[in-house]
Amino acid sequence: MSYTEELTKIKADVSVFYKTVDDLQLPLQVFFPDSFDQAKSYPTVIAIHGGAWNSLKETPVDWDGGWMGNNVKYYQQKGYVGIVFSYRDFAICPDGVGGILEDCRDAMEYIANTFSFVDANNILLMGDSAGGHLALCLAMNLPNHTPCALHPKKIAVYNPVTDCVSGLWSYCAKEPNLYSPVHHPKKIVADILLMHGLSDSVVSIEESRIFTQKMKEAGNQITMMEIPGAEHAFILFGYTNSEEGVLEALRLTDKHFDL
């Protein structure tokens, strides 16, 4: 059995719906490390999946954690609490990605108010592609300085969408500029790691380079790693990358944050 298959077999310790919108229930799962003690607090990894903001249009049955379920299980195996959730499809959200960000903020508030074992001062927030975009918007309080209940000190984003105005992504909202991290650089209290594949044909690596430079100029602690040969969504198990390639990207993440 491969490592990916072993991860896939792991079931969530907590499986709930964190929010209901017009009869659509949005799922959230938590994975506990070995010897978990409810009375203790644990470093936590929260992952936001991508998929061009395409997600749920009806309540899922037996949701399996989605595209980034195995990523948080990887960290659960290393002694972390792992949390993953999903959100409404942009097509059924008010103002597209604006409604999705509302879901993400509600999920973060649910985590903050419900799980006392989450160490709020030791959270890694990670996101892939559109999920990386959502993670950055949460960390940067976009749009319009909208606050988030949790303030992760470690942010890892993989081939994130940072410019919603130009190129492929302007469909995401009526005013895409409001949701474009590259157009709103600001100083945030977090260590940001951005990884982008040099063979990515979906999200332009040049946009990540521009975003990184603007965030550095704003005074941020941000590191960009360019991954040779990596295609889009290289951080996902069972997608464009080999198992070893995914693990190597996760090991680079671990080394950067000393996880």
Image: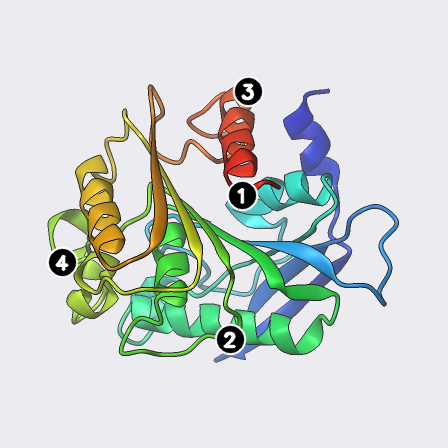
Q: Is residue 162 visible?
A: no
Mark 1 or 3 closer to N-term?
3
Q: Residue at x 60, y 50 (%)?
A: 65
Question: Which x, y percent locates residue 144?
Answer: 27, 78
Quarter in which the N terminus is drawn? top right
Q: Secondary structure at mark 3?
A: helix
Q: Secondary structure at mark 2?
A: helix
Kindly identify the amino acid type of the residue bearing the numbered disc 1: Phe
Q: Residue at x 55, y 48 (%)?
A: 66
Return the residue at label 2: 106
Asked whether disc 3 touches disc 2, contact meaning CB atoms under 8 Å apart, the reply is no
Q: Say the numbered circle drawn on residue 244.
A: 3
Mark 1 or 2 closer to N-term?
2
Return the residue at label 1: 257
Q: Nearer the viewer, mark 1 or mark 3?
A: 1
Question: Which x, y percent locates residue 130?
Answer: 35, 51
Kindly identify the amino acid type of the residue bearing the numbered disc 4: Val
Asked whether disc 1 touches disc 3, contact meaning CB atoms under 8 Å apart, the reply is no
Q: Nearer the viewer, mark 1 or mark 2?
A: 1
Quarter in which the C terminus is drawn? top right
Q: State the separation of the CA atoms marked 2 and 4.
A: 25 Å
Q: State the separation of the CA atoms marked 1 and 3.
A: 20 Å
Q: Secondary structure at mark 1?
A: helix
Kindly identify the amino acid type of the residue bearing the numbered disc 3: Glu
Kindly identify the amino acid type of the residue bearing the numbered disc 2: Asp
Mark 3 or 2 closer to N-term?
2
